[in-house]
Image (cartoon, rainbow, N blue to C red):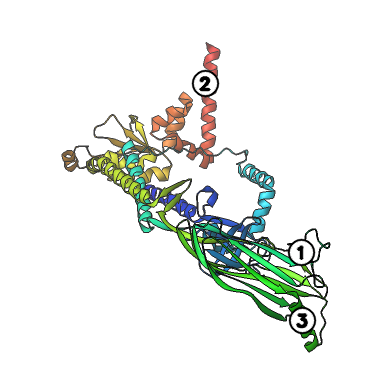
Amino acid sequence: MIGRTVIGRWLGGLAILLSFALIWWLFAPRSLGGITQFVVINGNSMAPLYQRGDLVITRVADDYAPGDIVTYRHPEIGLVIHRIIGQDDERWQLKGDHNDFVDPYEPLTTEIEGRAWLHIPRLGSGLVLARQYWWLIIVALAGGMVMAQPRATGRRRRPRHAIVQPVEVEMAAVTLCALGAIIAGMLAGYAFLQPASRVVNEPVVYRQHGIFTYLADAPPGVYDTEQAQTGDPVYFQLSSTLVVTFHYELPNVTTASGTIALNAEVSTTNGWRRRLALAPAQPFQGTEATVQGVINLADLRALIGQFEQQTGLSNPYYLLAITPDVAVNGKVDGLVFSDTFAPQLLFRFDKVQLTLVNPTDDRQGLAPRAEGRVARTRIEPAQLSLMFLSLEVQTARWWGMVIAGGLAVVFFAIGWPLWRRWQRDETLRIQFWYGNLIITGTAPHVDLPRVAVATMADLTRLAQRSGGLIIRDTSSEPSQYVFINDGTVYVYQAAESDSEAYLRFTPAPVEPCPPLVDWRDRFLTTLRETGLVSEACQAVGVDPFTAYRERSQNLAFAQAWREARQKHWEAATEQRGEA
């Protein structure tokens, strides 16, 4: 039935709209306001789970936990996808499944861009190729469009008509209001399912700085000064003591307190080590502290001699590490923190001299540095990402309810009168259900048998089977719907708009007149006389579609049609010649 077809189209359109919204919510990329990111695997650090060329789709999550596979933005490398293996305060520790080491960079929660959600093997390689050879894809699509175009043939197609169903403004407005109210209600409902606020951990950085200095006694003439100073080699034959000083500082901390000690450690490359206490732990107050220790070089040489005598080993060199042990509690920007600081000053020595080893990172060397972070917790409104817009959850709730309520009011304000009109005006219902088969005008008055049909659905089925159109006769009141086919006029009498008249009206069947034996004979006679198909159709009461369809299906009738046109042309030619 036509009505079911119309409802199906509306429901299909609504389903397409909702499907598009769902697809957007699931797969909209972050660059367009979504929460999804497409990652193409280009290494083997996550093998065997992810192989080179795979596509991994990640989505932003509210929280993360060890075991999650996430993507984060490395400040130098770029986007990295690895597995979380642990957490250190506000920083996450990650590692590739195929790697034998932990990632040196530990990202903050704010630097994690999403958790793995969907894995599609080998699709990433295709996306990379499509991005590189986009012009080939455009050419292929253009060629496909050309190939899809219908080609002309020697056979002329049967003409078809397509008339857009007229929909009154009120119906369109009601439909749009209903769809808008549904969408706004869905937005409000989704917003109510989300928390209105979120906890944000904002890192506050504090810095720890240190400075190593050392002095060794020496006779005049060996160094520029009377002592070996920081950076100079120290010779056992010339110096008896090594004085090491460490100055500790917290440059951006307001208040602090703790303890500081100084220790030394002698070791060899085979793992042997011996710990020496240079200065015991002593408390300090404030953001600066200094500790000093003295190493007797003769005792150091005696320790090595005893080790070699007892073990029978003789190493070419040994290592001496000076380590301050700092434990500090303090406040930075009003936030309390606790931390430790234990950098190393490393020397290498043999039986002749002791030299400073050049540092390789910030925790060694003469001026070691370290940074710590303490989280500042604040609550901020949660956000909803909608295509290119970002709304606060509270705003989305409020606007969703306001828009849905406003559209619902408009829906009832327009829909209720329309519904009452729908109930009492059959013409409106007919136009809604069957408008694509109806043309409005004055029905031709032809001397043909008339048959009254009981329902509009029956008249519509006749028109659909015959491929013709129904005429809404505006010259009658109430409206009549007329369909002319095969020498018969089929009529449906619509009810009056007035409700009482509608209840009072009952279609009265019209007795049919005996039908013509064959309308084609009269059609050909009129065609020979006038030469016009329209005149011939009006004379027999058939529409042109029926006549042309009969000609295409009946070869004898088609031949008679051509002969009738030829005779009319010959007669017209003779008349012009006589004139």
Pick whichever of labels 2 and 1 is earlier in the sequence. 1
- At horizontal 66% and vertical 65% (from top left) the residue drawn is 245
Secondary structure beneath label 1 = strand
- Does any portion of residue 533 appear in the rendered image? yes
Q: Is residue 426 above or below residue 538?
A: below
Nearer to the camera, 212 or 129: 212
Q: Position of residue 232 (x, y in %)?
A: 77, 63
Q: CA distance from mark 2 to mark 1?
A: 135 Å
Q: Which residue is mark 2?
A: 571
**Which picture quadrant has residue 107?**
bottom right
Is any atom of residue 488 visible in this view? no
Q: Which residue is mark 1?
A: 228
Query: Would you say 124 lies left or right of 498 here?
Result: right
Q: Secondary structure at mark 3?
A: helix
Callout in the foreground (3, 2): 3
View extreme (front): residue: 220
| Residue that numbered label 3 is attached to | 302
Amino acid at the residue labelled 2? Ala
